Image (cartoon, coloured by chain):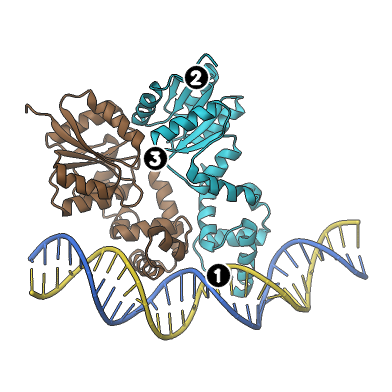
Chain colours: A cyan, B brown, C yellow, D blue
Amino acid sequence: MSSPARVMMVDDHPLFRKGLMQLFSLEPGLELVAEASSGEEAVQLAEECDPDIILLDLNMRGMDGLDTLRAMRAAGVTARIVMLTVSDNNADVVACIRAGADGYLLKDMDPEDILEQVLAATHGKMAISQRLTEILASALRKPDKTGADTLSTLTSREYQILQLIADGLSNKLIARELDISDATVKVHVKHLLKKLGMRSRVEAAVWMVNQKRSEST
Amino acid sequence: MSSPARVMMVDDHPLFRKGLMQLFSLEPGLELVAEASSGEEAVQLAEECDPDIILLDLNMRGMDGLDTLRAMRAAGVTARIVMLTVSDNNADVVACIRAGADGYLLKDMDPEDILEQVLAATHGKMAISQRLTEILASALRKPDKTGADTLSTLTSREYQILQLIADGLSNKLIARELDISDATVKVHVKHLLKKLGMRSRVEAAVWMVNQKRSEST
DNA sequence: GCGCGATTACCTCCTAAGGGGTAGGCGGCG
DNA sequence: CGCCGCCTACCCCTTAGGAGGTAATCGCGC
């Protein structure tokens, strides 16, 4: 308990790092030992410096925070990793936690609260923004299988129709495309929505587009 | 030239303000006279303090930076206004410049460069991130049908709602999010679909997601 | 002042979408 | 063989979405 926690900071915004640095300099329990401005740099530095806690920006150019998180865990980094982000996007939160993050803080929190959460994280506590707890709770309730897992529960016909939805087609157009009745299309849509746990074709379309995009990158 | 430029800072992230503050404190030519954490506050404060230059975050909750910019210009604020943002979105840049911004800087620039640009802005120069000059140039060159130009025909409210559609939200949820009637949301959706030449929100959602993805990369 | 565009909100009308059920045909599998 | 999952197609029903119009308010520019 004598020595301060060794902190590493990963963010591609120099100004934001400055802000955090200033904030942490006031806290004797924290010692900044490393800074990285990209995911690649971060993974390497994390292995070299072996910090106690890593603050990781989710939204970075190139290798994003989630990728970096996974790469670190894959490389055997055991530090506590707290995500820092502007986004309170549902899927992001859940994906990060699943990928082994020890916290998820929003950048627009009060600096004092951030400091408090980070300190708590060094003591083994999970650092989650208050605003996110209910999102997390509802996400945990349903066994949301993100990505390929969820897709694999779909039949080929359902998957095919999901792709057409992701092209923006209506049920009628899909029916014409596949040469089946639009009533049948509605059945498939109904089923795939249920499997995906979504409430509208728009959700499904958006999700699918993002899915395809992130896979091809 | 004897007295320093009076600076006002608008950002809903306290940490980011801290970073900027620290940066500016090292520069005798700049004097921080006001801080705001929301658009509404910013407009009021700008009228009261009459600063020489305003640094305005584009991505804020509630009233966003573009709205704030327009409101300030509408209120007769004559200060030089420089947008600060993480987004190098095509349409945003063009829209801000058109709306009377005197600069557009990206938050992930080098602090030294930001400082230099801000100082230049106080001397009447246009402050534009190097990365953006070519975006701007191409935006001016071609009235790009499929991208920024189409988007720029939308009002800020319509654009805001389009973004929510691209998150998969229903009209009802959008209404709740923006605290307006769902009947009003339907009006905006109707208008933006007409402007985009699309026949359903699904088309718009898919298009928007792809748009955002390809422009932010 | 007047008009105009933006935002808000309502109206009607029609269609699209989605949840529930039933059911026939088909192919695989124990 | 029977059972099951998939695809097909319809029934019912309710809600969501989108097209058209009217209108009040506000701020801006002429």
In the image, residue A110 above or below residue B75: above
Quickly name the residue at label 2: A6
Q: Which amino acid type corresponds to the residue marked 2 in the rendered image?
A: Arg
Marks 3 and 2, the one that precedes in the sequence: 2
Tag 2, which secondary structure? Answer: strand
Chain at tag 2:
A
In the image, residue B116 above or below residue C24: above
Question: At 56% across and 72% down in the image, what residue appears?
Answer: A176
Quickly name the residue at label 1: A171
Measured as percent of width and height from the top left, residue A139 is found at 59, 49
Q: Which amino acid type corresponds to the residue marked 3 in the rendered image?
A: Asp
In the visual, does B168 lie left or right of A14?
right
Question: At 58% across and 39% down in the image, what residue appears?
Answer: A97
Tag 1, which secondary structure? Answer: helix
Measured as percent of width and height from the top left, residue B212 is found at 40, 49
In the image, residue B59 above or below residue A161: above
Chain at tag 1:
A
Question: How far apart are the alpha carbons under marks 1 and 2?
Answer: 56 Å
Quickly name the residue at label 3: A108
Question: At 59% across and 29% down in the image, what residue appears?
Answer: A73
Marks 1 and 3, the one that precedes in the sequence: 3
Q: Quadrant of the N terminus of chain A?
A: top right
